[in-house]
Image (cartoon, rainbow, N blue to C red):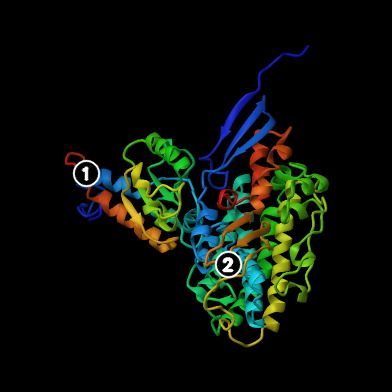
Amino acid sequence: MSIKTEHMVLNMGPQHPSTHGVLRLELELNGELIVNVKPHIGYLHRCFEKHAEAMTYPQIIPYTDRIDYLASISNNFGYAVTVEKLMGIQVPERVEYIRVIFGELQRIASHLVAIGTYGLDIGAFTPFLYCFRDREKILSLFEMTCGARLLYNYIWVGGLSHDIHPEFVRLTREFLNYFRPQVEEVNQLLSYNKIFIERTANIGILPAETAINFGMTGPNLRGSGVKFDLRRNDPYSIYDRFDFDIPVGDGRMGTVGDCWDRYFVRVLEIEQSIRIIEQALDQIPEGDVSSAIPKRIKPPVGSVYGRVENPRGELGYFLISDGGLNPFRLKVRGPSFVSLSVMGELCKGHLIADVIAILGSIDIVLGEVDR
Amino acid sequence: MGILDKEFSDSNIIITNFDNLMNWARLSSLWQLGFGLACCAIEMMATSASHYDFDRFGVIPRNTPRQADIIIISGTVTLKMALRIKRLYEQIADPKYIISMGSCSNCGGPYWEHGYHVLKGVDRVIPVDVYVPGCPPRPEALLEGLLKLQEKIRNESSVKKTA
């Protein structure tokens, strides 16, 4: 005999400690099982694209900082690469190397927040403190270079705002030597923790085909076992010169593409970023960082799509220029926005508590979802 | 200034007045609503994490407004979010305090001119006690803002209304 019941609708957010900002999830429940999840966004819509139409090209860079505020440098990077592509600017070697070093330092910092807050969501408080301790050291390297801790406005079109400090190379090496063993500490604290594995393995399984169909990129796609990374598959800047691996999920604790795989890809990516930074520090040439910055940025009429591998996936800028001082249109393709769309698919049939684990594992930043 | 000023030397007896005692208790355990809005929330998290350690000032994040004393409005307040913030504020029991963190929640910040969906200052919906400038403010700046708030609470009176 079956009892006919009604589905219950439960709102999660916008004020919820685990929604990573201001996101509202409308959960449709059958008892304690999820039938459907509808994300409601727009609580942090800050009108980036409207601003881009009103500002000149260099003025847009601080706004790109604030799209994905955990990975500001990567956003600057993507924007600079896009405008340079349209204008045909060749940037000096030294600039390229510094950009790569900062891009990878930013990736480490961003993944540390992702790992720390994921632990926090699941109920492990201590890894959060360890991750933020190491993140502060990266932030002090940024601060030494451009004076800002979070939003840098560092990578400009055609160059950089400042050259690196004479001590920067030595201090970065010192940091990497200190930081390499700390990754293992995170593994012992969190990755191989029995409770953590119970909460994340075999939860929110995302098969490779579904991930590709939804347009997922970055660690979320690689967690499903797809070896796709823009740094390798469509190299921009000078990423083709470095030797690094692309970690993918292998279903070590459960099934390929579960929450644990997506989480662990980020841990492995930190190690690869360390490798890239070390190679870049060895090869960095002398030179000027501001020689290629144009006096007036006025791209020719046309449109261009530039994309970079942000810590969360493919960050693309579609830029249409009418030959004026400000863009005619600037569209951002954000990886978090795309990743969020898969929530309904991932949560089906899971418990309410697993929604937290799944949402944390796709690592969204609401600033970039809403822009 | 502290509550232990008029302690008798030989025993555990303290003479103080009601206001001093209440203010001392209130300013030493300001429980914060764990509520992040935008970029400044990351700096707020950094402030409560290991390096800056918000806990030593008695600021402990609570996840429900019913248990909280202060809200740190950390980030851009959009028109869609403004009503929710007002409701959260109304759910907090008195006495309650607001720290507005960062340019966005102070006045709209960089989104002031073209941000058609950004509230130009959170003080248009809820009363603010301390404004912390910066985009984003450093953790030290947020700590300074908290100390300013504690100073304000220290001078409050339960009989006389202070501005």
- The amino acid on which the numbered mark 1 sits, given as a three-letter code, is Asp
- Determine the image quadrant of residue A40: top right
- Tally the marks: 2
Percent position (x, y) of residue B98? 35, 47
Query: Relative to the observer, which residue lies in front, A371 or A131?
Result: A371
Q: Are marks 1 and 2 on the same chain?
A: no
Q: Residue furthest left?
A: B160
Percent position (x, y) of residue A88? 66, 74
- The amino acid on which the numbered mark 2 sits, given as a three-letter code, is Gly
Q: SS class of the residue under badge 1?
A: helix
Query: Relative to the observer, which residue lies in front, A7 or A337?
Result: A337
Query: Relative to the observer, which residue lies in front, A183 or A44?
Result: A44
At 76% across and 76% down in the image, what residue appears?
Answer: A241
Q: CA distance from mark 1 to mark 2?
A: 67 Å
**Which residue in the protein does label 1 denote?**
B19
One can see residue B128 in this view: yes
Q: Chain of mark 1?
A: B
Image quadrant occupied by the N terminus of chain B: bottom left
**Which residue in the protein does label 2 denote?**
A323
Judge from the rendering whether residue A89 lies leftward or rightward of residue B101; answer left or right: right
The answer to whether the residues at label 1 and label 2 have Cβ atoms under 8 Å apart is no
Question: How crowded is the residue under tag 2: few (<14 C-alpha within 10 Å), some, or many (20+)?
Answer: some
Disc on res. B132: none
Q: SS class of the residue under badge 2?
A: loop
Above or below, A243 against A321 in this view is below
Above or below, A155 against A66 in this view is below
Percent position (x, y) of residue A104? 66, 68
